Amino acid sequence: MAEHIKIVEVGPRDGLQNEKQFVDTAVKIELVDRLAAAGFQNVEAASFVSPKWVPQMADGAAVMAGIDRRPGTIYSVLAPNLRGFEGALAARADEVVIFGAASEAFSQRNINCSIAESIARFEPVAAAAKEAGMRLRGSISCALGCPYQGETPVAAVVDVAERLLRLGCDEIDVADTIGVGTAAQVGRVLRAVGQVADLGTRVSGHFHDTYGQALANILAALDCGVRIFHSSVAGLGGCPYAKGATGNVATEDVLYLLRGQGLHTGVDLDAVVDIGQWISERIGRPTSSRAGRALALKKA
Ligand SMILES: CC(C)(COP(=O)([O-])OP(=O)([O-])OC[C@H]1O[C@@H](n2cnc3c(N)ncnc32)[C@H](O)[C@@H]1OP(=O)([O-])[O-])[C@@H](O)C(=O)NCCC(=O)NCCSC(=O)C[C@@](C)(O)CC(=O)[O-]
């Protein structure tokens, strides 16, 4: 039996958060529902952050209220503070994502506080999530490089990973926010993180594709033993606080790669290709998934 890889589909959150034109709530709801129906175990559906900071995510409560929950699917939401957690709890999110950074400068730009302050802010969120029986995930932005500070020291990533694990995170994301990392660097960072967390069950790879390295980075991470990856349908996305960074690695490309590796995801690639075409039309830009484009052409 083929080994299972968990894909966390982050398109509805990471993919859409940077869209300048407000995407209708109904479109966001349909996107989440179609992705869940395509077989993703985990869909990152919304953010409970300040609407002044990220206006596109202002309708998180409405999105969560409108989705048709599939039993067994984990619907995750971002919560940077207790106010966000209260939103997540009211919305009946299955998983709360606290998001820090391995770079001080990025932490300031993204969540307006230092790394130490962010951990202190996450503490009550983590405790409340555990108390409520919710899953808790911790994201480490700029784990491979920062738009303001350059390459991130490996020790800084391990330090934040340890702090997030101490807060009780079930999973931590090693995130290449601006897509600058290369395979050798991924290996170095993950081997170091592997000293403090089990790479096979508690660490996920979150790669953006700005420099076209994301698939190579996924292979490097697989080699290190990582079995959870994040991706975004049609390669949607970009971070509002990382100028020039493009979207997450496209889900269609990742599924195509993993299928070729003989690995199992439980996700219907054909359905994801259709969803990629549909959402690209809705937001008025072509898909950035090469596999998505090729497979759609083949179907047509
Ligand atoms: C963290 C804060 C709130 C600090 O922002 P702040 O200005 O320092 O916080 P504040 O407590 O002074 O609040 C400012 C205003 O926001 C409100 N507020 C405060 N909290 C909330 C909340 N939860 N929900 C709704 N509203 C909130 C609060 O009520 C107040 O409203 P006002 O009094 O001015 O009307 C802000 O910086 C923020 O919201 N940042 C979010 C940035 C963000 O969402 N970035 C993108 C997601 S992270 C990412 O994409 C990276 C990742 C995860 O994908 C991995 C990777 O690739 O790197």
Image (cartoon, rainbow, N blue to C red):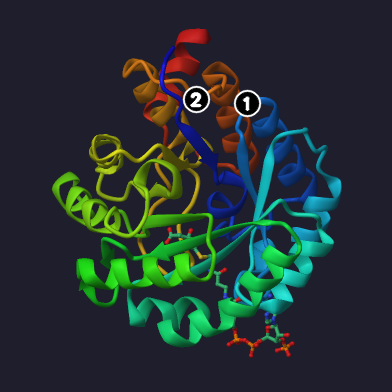
Residue most extreme to the left: 184
- Residue designated by label 2: 265
The secondary element bearing badge 2 is classed as loop
Badge 2 crowding class, 10 Å Cα cut-off, few under 14, some 14 to 19, many 20 or more, is: many
Q: Percent position (x, y) of residue 266?
A: 55, 22
Q: Is residue 81 left or right of residue 184?
A: right
Q: On the image, which quarter does residue 42 sit in? A: top right
Q: Percent position (x, y) of residue 89?
A: 78, 63
Q: Is residue 242 above or below residue 228?
A: below
- Going from N to C along the chain, the mark reached first, 2 or 1, is 1
Report whether residue 67 is seen.
Answer: yes
- Image quarter where the N terminus lies is top left
Q: Is residue 238 left or right of residue 49?
A: left
Real-space Cα separation, disc 2 to disc 1, in angstroms: 8 Å
Q: Amino acid under label 1?
A: Gly
- Residue designated by label 1: 39
**Which residue lies at the image location 41% right of the left edge and 82% below the top edge?**
115
Q: Amino acid under label 2?
A: Thr
**Which residue lies at the image location 76% right of the left edge and 43% below the top edge?**
29
Q: On the image, which quarter does residue 32 sit in? A: top right
Q: Percent position (x, y) of residue 168?
A: 54, 65
Quarter for ligand 1?
bottom right
Q: Is residue 12 above or below residue 279?
A: below
Report if the beta carbon of the residue with label 2 is closer than 8 angstroms to ligand 1: no
